[in-house]
Image (cartoon, rainbow, N blue to C red):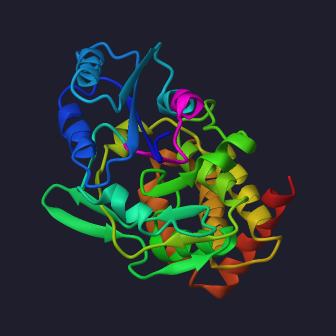
Amino acid sequence: MPLISVLVPVYNAEKYLHRCVDSILAQTFIDFELLLIDDGSTDSSGAICDGYTTIDNRVRVFHKENGGASSARNLGLENAKGEWITFCDSDDFVDTDWLKNYIDNSEGKCDLVVQTIKILNKGYDEINGPQYFIEGDGKKIMVALKYHGGTLGYPVNKLFSSSIIKTKFLRFREDIKLREDEDFVLRYLMYVNNGRIIKNGGYNYIIPDYHSKYLSIDVFDIEVELYKTAWLISGGKNNSALDNYQIELTLQLMATLFAGKYSHVRPFMKTIGLKVFRWISIKAIIKKIFDFVRKI
């Protein structure tokens, strides 16, 4: 049985699929399996995936009708054989020590290992995530990643216990198209007793075009679900991560009321909203709005 299962959903990724897969197969840690899930690609991605099975026996390929990244990841979860599970997106790539970083920090009673992420965006690089070691339960990890790190919703920089995923039957929601990965991570954190955030990382994330991809999506309902899960993790007590969610949800509500679709005005509302929250009287009014939303 391989120690790690690496799951890669693939859809029309022929331009960068070789870069992704080659970087995974070049890992210094070799006890892993690579599951490539072809999500009904209409280009040569499926054939490229099949080609890798003749090169490396650690590669397994699954072909399915197009259903989105969540359904592809779920098919991977159902077929993963590793003790640990992690993810990689087909348009990203990893450094050679990506998996080794995980294993070197997974000893003992560990439920989760989190790395930093290198964000690549047209000429400049940025490291996201706490660049120091943190250890604690799901609540502590949530606070660190949501408020201090900014990488809570990324499954690609996290090593998950296969046992927790299987016994709790955790899957990605296929009925939502935005922040479904953050929803999965939050639900996983509910069962984390000892997670670790390490200061190094090996994942290279290429920023997608969120504006064109999510222009018409109203994400208010999923934002409420995210807060509910975060509230459960926190045991019903406020903390910096919950405060951050409260700001997001309130801005979501305001934007929905004014524009109908939050994503149309998200950049504007984010900028204005953070300034508004510095005004104590306005903040109090908005908090009452949010408290009403939370009750319903």
* Location of residue 120 by image quarter: bottom left
Where in the figure is residue 268, as x and y percent of width and height? 43, 60
Please give left or right for residue 133 compared with residue 13 in the image.
Answer: right
Front one among 51 and 19: 51
**Please, is residue 140 above or below residue 2 in the view?**
below
**Please, is residue 34 above or below residue 54 in the view?**
below
Q: Residue extending furthest left?
A: 123
Q: Residue at x 23, y 16 (%)?
A: 44
Please give left or right for residue 290 compared with residue 109 in the image.
Answer: right
Badge count: 0
Please give left or right for residue 18 compared with residue 60 in the image.
Answer: left
Where in the figure is residue 72, as x and y percent of width and height? 49, 28
Q: Residue at x 66, y 47 (%)?
A: 163
Where in the figure is residue 85, as x and y percent of width and height? 51, 46
Q: Is residue 85 magenta?
A: yes
Q: Which residues are magenta?
A: 75-88
Q: Is residue 256 visible?
A: no
Where in the figure is residue 49, as x and y percent of width and height? 29, 22
Q: Is residue 68 magenta?
A: no
Front one among 31 and 259: 31
